[in-house]
């Protein structure tokens, strides 16, 4: 079976006055058709840059490696050919639905435009399809919304519009980058429910990128943990939570406050700060914060090892 | 029982026709941590601003025997050393042109002008160390620090005068989970050492559970439930509190209850009745006509719901 998305040895770096700063450092991953892949990591771990590169939105960053969508190479392809899939078969939604929508165009125009550009529909047909899509993402009074502007909708409603927009051309893969982070917990639950339904109905693959392990836990089949630009663990979701193998994953899980279990006098913490881009590249980048670090970790960087369903980049995994 | 440190009565804030706070009354006792939770737009930050008189309000806010809303400006200013706040955005709440040292020294210059420069430098240095930063960083500027470090500076600035009340308005919400715990532990340590009372505003219920003695739940400008933390999390009474708790994603995932619908009532459309009724799975005809007052139940609990005395079925 051809994976929906295959990324090989992808690096994203930025030119800086002090040299080159790497945001993503040799990442390889596969997303199978209809699979939900969770990608978790803290801010600065490179998870967003990775997927911006997939969408061709990495700006002036230097992107190297390979990104294949349904076996077609996107990196180095002409903009014309790459943009045939980007925005239609391969789409992305972002954290902030307000800044992702254009404030001076109606919802209907913004949605119909996707269909006019990608599928050659007329504006009238486009609006019809858009109205039906708003209904599918359970927006009340969908016809009326078409003539409203983004500021007239609530945050949760705007994120539904973004989701509707991403689904218009029946994509094979939707990338959702922190789709619920800006939303209240009750609205977050609705959007998670909607993403779940979307996978069930249309068989769309989903890459769910988030710093919030609990949000990812509810949806993902498989989870990648990123730290300082690299994948440090790749495991089935249930397995990752039951038995994390990378010390970073284990420490991170301990830090997530829980609604059940005993109340603690002090919260568990992870000492230290995440590394800055450009810090020692020869060592394991988690070593300075790692409770298990040994001499070897400070000289030799561990490679991601294991089978395709269970990988860890650690000299001394749990 | 102790005398309350802060007593808020019938606090009301209007933005035009829209009521941002509707008759909010509560007390904070010395040394306790009380969390204020609710969705965005519920009025949590407005309440903080009203207490600090950064926002015109009606009603009364009694703090250490003084009505803050009525007291003349010089008296209020003198009281500000006892009332401090830490904001959500650690970088935006620091002046980019002030070094970490200057930011922490400023409250001392204003409220303790008798200190000479050396004494002030010592206080700043020990405060920096106290919040877990090296005193060698005193001349660095905000942009040279990470988000977590900026929040430590904000906390140092807010606590250097040993305030009686510290309001934390989403103080850890923008931080990564690994840093969040460090900052919360720091706040708990400072609270214990300085004997501060804390009003901890947050939308993260799991964090709130860990650190608060009592929890207040706000919905569209009104307090709908106040309860000791343990009993609130074990057995929430108000349907809104129940729905909030049910919506929190957990590890491992639990079978989700049907998520709460998005409400159609807004603060300016509430004329009569309970503001939560359009989202409430337990609403009765009565709820449309009469707004339930916040009523005392046993064990230090207050709930504003017509059905608070019933045993309601769990949300399905």
Image (cartoon, helix red, strand yellow):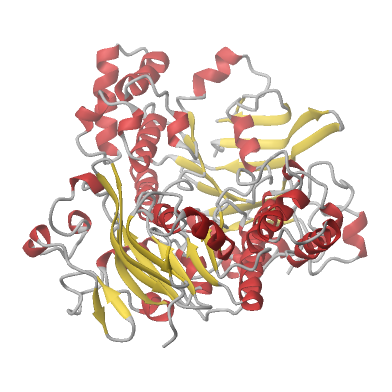
Residue B54 shows in the view: yes
Residue at x 43% of width, y 33% of height: A98
Compared across the picture, whether B254 is left or right of A148 comes to right
Task: Report the front residue among B265 and A39.
Answer: B265
Give the quarter of the image for residue A81: top right
Give the quarter of the image for residue A158: top left
Compared across the picture, whether A113 is left or right of A219 comes to left
Residue B256 shows in the view: no
Query: What percent of the width, then of the height, locates residue A71?
Result: 59, 29
Q: Please say if B306 is above or below A164.
A: below
Check the picture and name the quadrant holding the C terminus of chain B: bottom left
Compared across the picture, whether A304 is left or right of B2 comes to right
Number of numbered discs on residues: 0
Residue at x 65% of width, y 37% of height: A50
Check the picture and name the quadrant holding the N terminus of chain B: bottom left
Query: What percent of the width, then of the height, locates residue A155?
Result: 37, 41
Query: What percent of the width, then of the height, locates residue A77?
Result: 64, 18
Residue at x 27% of width, y 26% of height: A148
Q: Please say if A253 is above or below A142.
A: below
Task: Report the front residue among B307 and B134.
Answer: B134
Task: Report the front residue among B91 and A298.
Answer: B91
Q: Please say if A104 is above or below B266.
A: above
- From this viewpoint, which residue is outermost toward the bottom? B1
Q: Please say if B231 is above or below B141.
A: below
């Amino acid at each position: 079976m051809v994976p929906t998305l295959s990324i090989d040895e992808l690096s994203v770096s930025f030119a800086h006055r002090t040299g080159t700063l790497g945001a993503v450092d040799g990442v390889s991953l596969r997303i199978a058709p209809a699979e939900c892949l969770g990608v978790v990591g803290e801010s600065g771990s490179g998870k967003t840059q990775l997927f911006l590169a997939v969408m061709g939105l990495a700006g002036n960053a230097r992107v190297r490696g390979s990104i294949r969508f349904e076996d077609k190479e996107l990196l180095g392809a002409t903009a014309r050919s790459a943009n045939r899939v980007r925005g239609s078969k391969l789409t992305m939604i972002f954290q902030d639905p307000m800044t992702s929508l254009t404030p001076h165009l109606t919802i209907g125009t913004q949605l119909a435009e996707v269909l006019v550009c990608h599928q050659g529909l007329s504006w009238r047909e486009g609006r019809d399809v858009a109205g039906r899509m708003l209904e599918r993402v359970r927006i009340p009074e969908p016809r009326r919304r078409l003539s409203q502007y983004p500021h007239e909708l609530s945050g949760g409603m705007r994120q539904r519009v973004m989701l509707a927009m991403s689904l218009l051309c029946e994509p094979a893969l939707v990338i959702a980058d922190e789709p619920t982070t800006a939303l209240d917990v009750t609205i977050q639950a609705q959007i998670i429910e909607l993403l779940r339904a979307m996978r069930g109905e249309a068989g769309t693959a989903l890459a769910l990128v988030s710093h919030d392990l609990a949000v990812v836990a509810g949806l993902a089949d498989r989870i990648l943990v990123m730290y300082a630009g690299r994948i440090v663990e790749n495991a089935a979701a249930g397995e990752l939570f039951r038995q994390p193998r990378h010390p970073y994953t284990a420490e991170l899980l301990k830090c997530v406050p829980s609604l059940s279990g005993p109340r603690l006098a002090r919260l568990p913490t992870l000492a230290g700060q995440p590394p800055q881009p450009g810090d020692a590249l020869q060592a394991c980048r988690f070593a300075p914060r790692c409770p298990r670090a040994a001499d070897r970790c400070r000289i030799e960087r561990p490679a991601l090892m294991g089978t395709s369903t269970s990988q860890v980049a650690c000299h001394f995994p749990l | 029982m102790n005398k309350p440190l802060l007593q808020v009565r019938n606090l009301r804030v209007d933005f035009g026709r829209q009521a941002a706070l509707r008759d909010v009354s509560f007390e904070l006792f010395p040394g306790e941590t009380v969390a204020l939770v609710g969705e965005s737009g519920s009025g949590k930050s407005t309440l903080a601003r009203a207490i600090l008189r950064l926002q015109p309000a009606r009603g009364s806010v009694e703090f250490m025997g003084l009505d803050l809303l009525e007291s003349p400006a010089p008296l209020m200013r003198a009281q500000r050393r006892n009332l401090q706040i830490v904001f959500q955005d650690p970088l935006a709440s620091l002046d980019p042109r002030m070094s970490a040292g200057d930011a922490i020294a400023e409250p001392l210059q204003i409220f303790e002008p008798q200190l000479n420069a050396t004494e002030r430098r010592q206080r700043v240095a020990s405060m920096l160390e106290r919040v877990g930063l090296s005193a060698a960083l005193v001349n660095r500027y905000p942009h040279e620090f990470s988000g977590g470090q900026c929040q430590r500076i904000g906390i140092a600035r807010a606590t250097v005068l040993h305030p009686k009340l510290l309001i934390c308005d989403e103080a850890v919400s923008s931080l990564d989970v690994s840093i969040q715990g460090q900052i919360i532990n720091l706040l708990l340590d400072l609270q214990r050492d300085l004997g501060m009372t804390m009003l901890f505003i947050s939308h993260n219920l799991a964090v709130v559970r860990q650190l608060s003695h009592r929890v207040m739940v706000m919905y569209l400008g009104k307090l709908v439930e106040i309860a000791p933390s343990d009993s609130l999390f074990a057995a929430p009474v108000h349907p809104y509190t129940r729905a909030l708790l049910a919506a929190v994603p957990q590890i491992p995932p639990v079978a989700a209850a049907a998520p709460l619908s998005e409400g159609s009532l807004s603060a300016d459309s509430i004329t009569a009745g309970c503001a939560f009724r359009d989202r409430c799975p337990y609403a009765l005809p009565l709820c449309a006509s009469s707004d339930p007052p916040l009523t005392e139940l046993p064990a230090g609990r207050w709930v504003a719901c017509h059905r608070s005395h019933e045993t309601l079925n769990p949300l399905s």
